[in-house]
Image (tube, grey):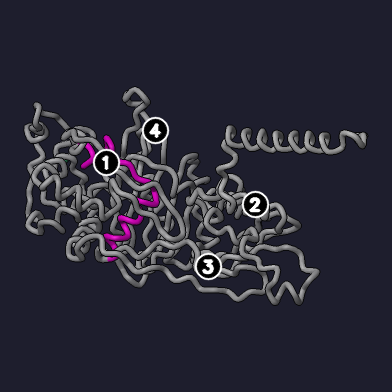
Amino acid sequence: MIKLRKKNYAANLYRIFLICMAGIFLLFACRVHSRSEVTPVSVGQTILMSEEYTPGTVFDRNGEVIAAGDSGELCWSTEETRDAFLQVLGPDIHSTLLSGTTILGNCAWVFGTEDNRWGIYSLLHPAAGKIGGSVKLTLDRRLQEYAAQLVRQNGHEEAYIIVSDYKTGEILAAYGDVFGESMHPGSTMKPILAATALSLNPELEDYVYDCVPENHIFQIENGAVEINCAENMFHGELSMENAIAYSCNGYFISLMQKADHAKMLEALKKWGFDTSISYEQFMYWDHSFIKNSRSETDYLMAAIGQANAYMTPAGLHFCTNVLLNHGKLAEPVLYSGKQSSPGSPWKTIEAGEAKEVCGSEAADKVAGMMELVTEIGTGTSFYLPGFAAKTGTAQKEDEDGNLTGLCTVWTTGGLTDENTPYAVTVCLDDVDEYVGSAAAGKMAQSILIYMTEGGE
Ligand SMILES: [Zn+2]
């Protein structure tokens, strides 16, 4: 205790006041210095609430519980459910809030942010614990667990799978960091370019390219570049549909040279390339085609999904949905129902309007060409009736641009029968060259068989 002598009472009080002011000023200076003063209040509040509240329940599309709050924690239904959903659900709110690429990062109400302690329910249940709201996902728990099991069976470490209904936009399964990880799309870029080129100029459908050695030298402003087909194959004379079926690099590079560069780049923005697109329920890293490069070599290499062409598995999947859905993208959604807090009514969440990305005739033509991939082309080993698909392989380089011998392999596609409007994209990253894109295709085929033969 500070003993205040009566004589100096006022002066001592003034000194204590000054010391307190200096303390407050110092504390503020420290916060500015450490940048902690810029933390938005809402984020801090959410984090605090997540510590105070027991989370609500996460249901799948059929009402099955994926995870539910229990004495302050979010607990998984089973260990298998945890393995399948951990990445996409993102239950650690400290690291996923505002990330935009996980489900719970976008559903903060599960952690209690929308609980109204003055609501009728709370007033009638004054002793009720603090419990967050609940969410109903569009994901199918069993399908998601099946996808995770498929990855384990095939022994892959870096695998990404996304499945959706291309007519409604509902995402049915999302395994791995499908919204966050970008990779070279390789030849899966070709159907997108075909549909874009046909949208701009329908006559290009008749474009023919002769895949012979001399036609693999491409003249550019400052010289020439040689770009070969995979395994230095020569496909001979090809129409557009055969170029897609057999995945001819030369065809698409010469098509891109023939097309109006500026118009192509502008039209590619509608698909999300070199621009910014985000959706109501999540974000994903927008895909790039040439970025800011003005190099013609980069433009030509992007035609085969290399150089500056990058996509997330989700980004590529939505482009495939456009092709299967007559040129329109049904807005992708991850959840369809929301309950702000226990006892409050469930609210149905409607998806936004479908968006036109390319002409319907162009999309339908290219979807038909993609059916040839599994009928006669690079995807015969995973044929299914009406499975329109495209394979892709991209070689991985190290930081200095040297080939590492590892690849990213893809298959993206879906069933053209509109009674089973399912699209699936499988990506295996950092795999050895011999693995090949058909490995991803066979996993996609297994998923479609599982869905159509009563798995879902
Ligand atoms: Zn070729």
Q: What's the CA distance linking mark 2 and mark 3?
A: 19 Å
User: For the residue with label 1, is its CB less than 8 Å from the closest atom of ligand 1?
Assistant: no
Q: Do callouts 2 and 1 mark residues in contact (Cβ within 8 Å)?
A: no
Q: Earlier in the sequence, mark 4 or mark 3?
A: 3
User: Closer to us: mark 2 or mark 4?
Assistant: 2
User: Closer to us: mark 2 or mark 3?
Assistant: 3
Q: Earlier in the sequence, mark 1 or mark 4?
A: 1
Q: Which residues are magenta?
A: 301-325
User: For the residue with label 3, is its CB less than 8 Å from the closest atom of ligand 1?
Assistant: no
Which residue is situated farthest in the front direction here?
7
Residue at numbered disc 2: 79
User: Closer to us: mark 1 or mark 4?
Assistant: 1
Q: Secondary structure at mark 1?
A: loop
Where does the N terminus fall, quadrant-wise? Answer: top right
The amino acid pointed to by label 3 is Arg
- The quadrant in which residue 446 appears is bottom left
Residue at numbered disc 3: 61
Count of numbered circles in the view: 4
Residue at numbered disc 1: 305
Q: Earlier in the sequence, mark 1 or mark 3?
A: 3
The foreground one among 62 and 283 is 283
Q: Earlier in the sequence, mark 2 or mark 3?
A: 3
Task: Report the disc number at residue 406.
Answer: none
**In the rendered view, would you say 10 is above or below 270?**
above
Q: Residue at x 64, y 63 (%)?
A: 57
198 to the left or right of 339: left
Residue at numbered disc 4: 432
Residue 21 position within the rendered picture, expressed as x and y whole percent measured from the top left = 71, 37
- Circle 4 residues within 10 Å: few <14, some 14–19, many ≥20: some
| Residue 165 part of the magenta-drawn span | no
Q: What's the CA distance linking mark 4 and mark 3?
A: 36 Å
